[in-house]
Amino acid sequence: MKHKIPSAMMALAAAAALSGCVVVPAHRYGGEVAYAAPAVVIDTPPPAPYAEVIPAMPYAGAVWIGGYWGWSGGRHHWVPGYWERPRPGYRWEPHHWENRGGHWQLHMGGWVRG
């Protein structure tokens, strides 16, 4: 004779199994959530700046967050820009690469008070 497992028990087991799949914010800055990103230091300079075509502003006051050259999988890749709502009392500090003695470090952008 086969045993039948009630649907409620199956749902409970599935919920318990999936409860471990959670992304937890690393830091909070002024009410905004920032996820931790490892520092990127490489020996390869980023490519020449990419000329992005900035689409029309979607609403009054939107702030353009420009794209940048990121680093993943052992190579540079373009991370496209996007429009975002402004943060009162903050300004956007863009992502940028800094050359330190032939080593390139990516400084991630973010909202800065001021």
Image (cartoon, rainbow, N blue to C red):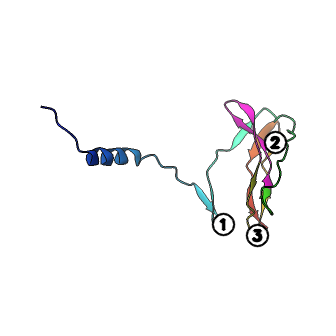
Residue 37, magenta (yes or no): no
Occupied quadrant, residue 111: bottom right
Q: Which residue is mark 1?
A: 30
Q: Position of residue 112 (x, y in %)?
A: 75, 62
Q: Which residues are magenta?
A: 64-81
Q: Secondary structure at mark 2?
A: strand
Occupied quadrant, residue 76: top right
**What residue type is disc 3 on?**
Gly
Q: Secondary structure at mark 1?
A: loop
**What residue type is disc 1 on?**
Gly
| In contact (CB < 8 Å): disc 2 and disc 3 | no
Q: Position of residue 31 (x, y in %)?
A: 63, 66
Q: Residue at x 52, y 53 (%)?
A: 24
- The relative height of residue 79 versus residue 94 in the rendered view (above or below) is above
Q: Which residue is at the front of the view, 24 or 45?
A: 24
Q: Which residue is mark 2?
A: 100
N-term-proximal mark, 2 vs 1: 1
Q: Which residue is mark 3?
A: 89
Q: Residues within 10 Å of mark 3 (few under 14, many from 20)?
A: few
